[in-house]
Image (cartoon, coloured by chain):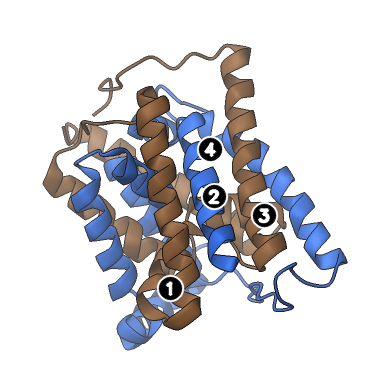
Chain colours: A blue, B brown
Amino acid sequence: MRNVVAAGVGVVLAVALGLGRLTRPEVILGWVDVLGDWDPTLAWFMSGAAPVYALAHRWVLARGGPVLGRELPLPTAAAVDAKLVLGSALFGAGWALGGVCPGPAFTSLGAGATWAVPFVLAMMLGLWAAAPRRLGAGIELVTSLGFTRRRAGSF
Amino acid sequence: MAGAAGDTQSTSMPVQLETLGAGALFGAGAGALLLLHGRIAGISGIAAQALETAGSERAWRLWFLAGLLAGGAWVGWRASASIAFEHVVRTPWLLLAGLAIGVGARVGNGCTSGHGVCGVGRLSRRSMAAVVTFSASGALVYRLIAACGGLS
């Protein structure tokens, strides 16, 4: 049953991304082109998505757990740390380079766009290689440096 | 890269309403995963964990990714204008972009879906910071690339 739900949700998300045109690289590139020909599509999409998701979030909390099972593993970290900021900054650089988010990458792959093959492979390699236990020491070092520099900075 | 867009973005109200509606559908799908399965529909997180889990924990993630591909096939068939069958950016740069997206999403604990929709939806400070960070960083890098003559 969980697999059916997961597959169904996957289909819905891909269709939503397609209908919202977030699968078009120029939409994401337009979003980061704030000083030029700015495209607010992403903001409209998120404005539609976040409130609906918020309702589901309140609902699942109110009923004390999900329908299929009792487990509700929600993120518990609260602090905005250097790891979050550095990772997200790199993610933003990826946006600016290709204009492709992970969801639209899979959606485009399913649609038969050939460029999505190398893109998804590179993305999967990145997701795999940057697992905490693989980057481990490296990430710790980089984030601690980033953190001290941030704290020592002029702001 | 600037000016390479295939079609001009209309800013008329119906288009914005359509995007809002598509977003609501995305929120409903992600909400259904949370309500039924108790999991966050962060696409990069699910893809990453699919590589590292086993058994039923891996199975549902693979089904989810298969669903994304199947939904993508539908989009390619019924809404093909939404698919870029050719990418304006050349493959070496796309590989770099994919790598940056993968590493960035893993280190930053999420992508546009996990932070932008699910995190923002539950008013997570970390997710709001992530969205601001990747948008700002994207804008900066985009400017730098444009100043260097683009990638296409």
Which residue is at 70% across, 78% downward? A71
CA separation, marks 4 and 3? Answer: 14 Å
Residue at mark 2 to residue at mark 4: CA–CA distance: 23 Å
Q: Secondary structure at mark 1?
A: helix
Residue B102, relative to residue A10: is it above or below?
Answer: below
Q: Amino acid at mark 4?
A: Ala
Q: Earlier in the sequence, mark 3 or mark 1?
A: 3
Identify which residue is drawn at 37% across, 22% down: B81
Which disc is residue B49 wearing?
A: 1
Residue A47 horizontal/vertical position (percent): 66, 37
Determine which of the numbered discs, if any, sits on residue A16 in the image.
4
Snapshot quadrant of residue B78: top left
User: Does B130 sit left or right of A106 as displayed?
Assistant: right
Q: Specify the quadrant of the image occupied by residue B72.
A: top left
Disc ID at residue B132:
2
Q: Are marks 3 and 2 on the same chain?
A: yes
